[in-house]
Amino acid sequence: MLSARDLKITFNPGTPIETRALRGLSLDIPAGQFVTVIGSNGAGKSTFLNAVSGDLPVDSGRIEIDGADMTRQAVWARAAKVARVFQDPMAGTCEDLTIEENMALAQMRGARRGYGRAVKASMRDGFRERLATLGLGLENRLSDRIGLLSGGQRQAVSLLMAALQPSRILLLDEHTAALDPRTADFVLQLTARIVAENRLTTMMVTHSMRQALDVGDRTVMLHQGQVVLDVSGDERKGMDVPDLLAMFERVRGEKLSDDALLLG
Amino acid sequence: MSLFSLLGALEIGLIFSLVALGVFISFRLLRFPDLTVDGSFPLGGAVCATLIASGTDPFLATIAATFAGAAAGLVTGWLNVKLRIMDLLASILMMIALYSVNLRVMGKPNVPLITEPTVFTILQPGWLSDYVARPLILVVIVIVAKLLLDWFFATQTGLAMRATGSNGRMARAQGVHTGRMIMGGMALSNALVGLAGALFAQTQGGSDISMGIGTIVIGLAAVIVGESILPSRKLVLATLAVIIGAIVYRFFIALALNSDFIGLKAQDLNLVTAVLVTIALVIPMLKRRVFGKK
């Protein structure tokens, strides 16, 4: 499980372009839950995700994964517990390496790497089996460079790679945003299936309210670096995009009036 | 070209294939433009020649030179990773620093090895003349180095190192300590260059402070020539291509310098190198223009 307490991140502090990206954000994700995170541009979605992954150091606050304090850990040190799929399909895989080499790299995520052979014959069957579930014919292309695949194919392989090794939390960073609608839909279905099959604790950042309601068990909305909306269970089941939009507007309106009061 | 100059070209080509393998690791695998090479090559020569001249066993001296090269690469990596100095600049700083270090190591601008034993005089069988024996010994050394590299880059750690160069962010997300990989890779790269420097000093009758000038260009030329002759993404073939490139490059140089009708002399070496590298860089573009876009 993930526990984020009062996270604060300010970009360019003390300058005219100072941005308070996270303003005391707190969120708990219990084990096995699939949370979707939405919010407008600049709400702090990606900043929050990067803080959890370790890419961005937090100014203050505390990040715990499974009860262990991760706040000051580097990205590579968190990798045993955190799996990640990036927004850019090119970012999650090494284009110079083959499909099997990429998968072998992910198979060892967070483990000590020694001097054994990276790609063993015994691994290949497992890789083939998993790739076959994609239905893209990639199981016959293990030794092809992954740079030869399309963005959607690479994103699908990235998802498989993220699930090769158990993780405490899977971070999905708008991972369908760079894909065409059909491919995005395919990758989203795949996400739901992989998360369900492996019972992964998941946090998915998305720009699409539709997506946010379609998959997962809980939806969180960020605004100005804080959680402003948190729906799950029956309340969420009956929700549609207009409902969410209405709530979003209301929260935003209230926030604005709050600011107006403060400034006035 | 006489058999004598042919074997001479092969000998130097083989030595520089070790440099080329080192350059391949830094420039291609780690994508770290590393000019340390211009300092670590003469460092290897200086350490080896000085130790042999003071009576150390040539094998031990060669191993010490290899470690000296590794240490130089490690410092360059450290400057980049820990002090966050830009890669190219870190290597230039190291290259400059090594010039002084090399003078300090030798205590003078050059250390001759004329009568002293070398790994070549020890390994050379009595019935073979030295200009045949030296390339043979070097072939064995280069093949062993190539196979060791092929093995290493197929291991879990080796794969992590390649991933670091290819996509550092992804490597970190997979738990790879990329800083350590860069430092280790730079050490490995410059260890090969230090070894080459040590072997060069032992075949050329000593070490000289100026023997490192242009090493990086020759190494890079070898990598580029090799890649144009045998283009392959497979690592086992890529390392082979680099070795072939170093030897072919050296033959071209020997050919150019030995052909009286061209009128080139030894002092034209660097100009010839620059022209050859330019041609090798332009060939892929010309190919595309002639055969259409691939």
Image (cartoon, helix red, strand yellow):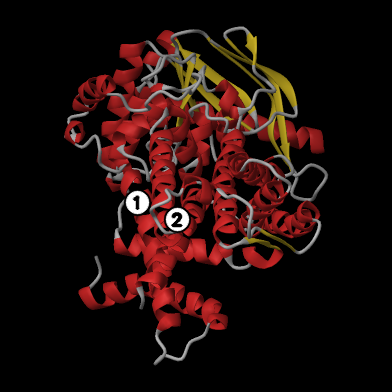
- Give the image location of residue A67, x and y in percent: 62, 7
Badge 1 density bin: few <14, some 14–19, many ≥20, Cα 10 Å:
many
Residue A228 in the image, given as x and y percentages of width and height: 60, 23
Residue under the image location 63 percent in, 65 percent down:
B211
Do residues under tags 1 and 2 come within 8 Å of each other at their CB atoms? no
Residue B240 numbered tag:
1
Element type where label 1 sits in the image? helix
Amino acid at the residue labelled 2: Arg
x, y (%) of residue B244? Answer: 35, 59
Q: Which mark is residue B134?
A: 2
* Quarter placement of the C terminus of chain A: top right
Residue type at numbered disc 1? Leu
User: Which chain contains the residue that carries disc 1?
Assistant: B
Q: Which residue lies furthest to the front in this view?
A: B127
Q: Which of B248 and A206 is in front in this view?
A: B248
Residue B256 drawn above or below residue B201: below
